[in-house]
Amino acid sequence: MLSLLVVRGPDRGRAFPLPECEPQLIGRSTEALDLTDISVSRRHAELTPENDQWLLRDLSSRHGTFINGVRVMGSMQLSEGDRVRCGDTELLVVVEGRAPSVLRDVATTHDVLRVNATVATSDDSMAQREAACVLALATLAAEPTDADAFLVAATKQLARDCACETSAIRDFEGMLVATHETLAPLELVRRAIDSGELLTTQMVVDGGARATLFIVPLITHRSIRGALVLQRASLAAPNQMEITLSTRAAEITSLALAARQQQQTHSTQERLAMIGETVAALSHSIKNILQGLRFSADAIDLALSRGELTKAQEGWPILQRNLDRIHALVLNMLAWTKERPLEPEPTDLNDIVREVRDLLAPMAARRRVGIALVLDPALTLVSIDAAAIHQALNNLTINAIEASPERVGLITIRTRTDSARDEVSLSVSDNGEGIPDPVRARLFEPFVSSKGQRGTGLGLAVARKIAQRHGGRLEVVSTSPRGTEIALSLPVVSEEFDPSATRAPRSSETGEFGWKFGP
């Protein structure tokens, strides 16, 4: 009995038996062969049995019907090995149960066999195996692996389903790269990739044994080119089950590779955009700081040239303030872009609060902003990297100082234990004008600032990153025209830590960030 095997088009790999004495309709209508190619007319062509032969007649289809490249005019007889083209779909005429005919591949000098659609299992069994194979491959495609790892896993899955050795070959600008060693001639693989045809051939292996190769090209998508190669030590041609499974595997593999390529392209574009945004934001911040340094240096130089030491001393605070800003910027850049391993140890947050208060006292004094501490004397120890939390609190306090009004500004730093959540919290509040609505939604994103040219937008982003690395959180408790409160919450130390254990010393320097100028 003749069958039509789809070798090209959306339904590639499917086979349609032609029952004797039953005319068949090629098309997309409900009574026709079940094709999904939208370039095929609903009633495209008709197959009619006559005297043990099949006649093909075009039904005035929109794009015509062709046999072996010749347009069908009237009725034409079909024979084994003929190729019928309807729209983008090409069907190969095969005989079930008969060895496929042989074609001479001039380019490779290998015998290339047309694919035979021998049905080896029942329809229900085939559907179940196909569904199981598709589910397994789809699960692999959904895993967050790169293209090479996915291909290795997919070929192993297909090898189990088809009980034969399987390899995936990708075409990288003319260079074929395989996931596993294969006997497939490269010229034959290239032919399958270029033509989109399913090809099979027989090879002589070591010891004179013969092996059958079945090559299924991937669906070409942009730069995705390649094929799946099935190999087994048998002369039997691929049966319908193997054709169906390998075709579905090729479709899923093609889509998975295309998705990974798209994701990689998108990630690259995102990285480039982020780099550009980072460079622009940092350049702007550094430019403002350098302008302040240049202004203060010129003022000091002019005063010294005139012998006016009092005027020169007035320029030192400006110079010191801008050096503090660039020092803080560098520290935040390092904290944001390069993660160093945390070194947690049981720590009393109250000690860190006092250190930050003492460190930033000169900065607050210049703006005449007060810093009040409300510390819980029974504060539970937390397992933290003291230097990292010190930097986070430092950033929060600097933001509060700059947000507070001069002369009447007041900052309050509180610590307390939340027994219900088994954590401690550290909050910083100010009496400034609050966070503007346009900034509030993106407050913790890098390079987003409500301070205009005075801010870099890294302080809160770094503080939140440090909190999250400790298993904690940073959140805005409240913000209004009367001020803002931001809280840093951290899990308490576990019982396995010994609070009396000796810890490494922590440096504590006077002056803002260790810089000290002037008398």
Image (tube, rainbow, N blue to C red):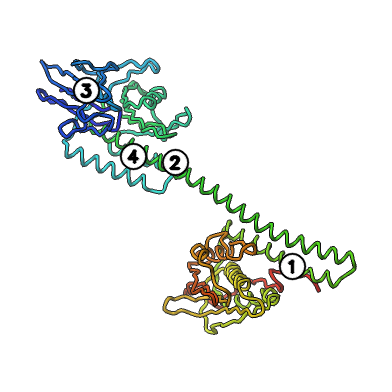
Q: Nearer the viewer, mark 2 or mark 1?
A: 1
Label 2, label 4: how far apart the Cα atoms are: 14 Å
**SS label for mark 1:** helix
Residue 219 shown left or right of residue 491 in the figure? left
4 or 1: tag closer to the N-terminus: 4
Q: Nearer the viewer, residue 453 or 388?
A: 453
Label 3 SS: loop
User: Which residue was labeled with disc 2?
Assistant: 261
Residue 183 drawn at (x, y percent): 38, 26
* Residue corresponding to mark 1: 320
- Look at the numbered disc 2 and give the secondary structure of its residue: helix
Say few, some or many: other residues with alpha carbon within 10 Å of mark 4 (under 14 / 14 to 19 / 20 or more): many
**Which sits earlier in the primary sequence, circle 3 or circle 1?**
3
Name the disc covering residue 252, or none.
4
Give the residue number, with chain letter if any, for mark 3.
60
Mark 4: which amino acid? Ile
Q: Is residue 416 above or below residue 217?
A: below
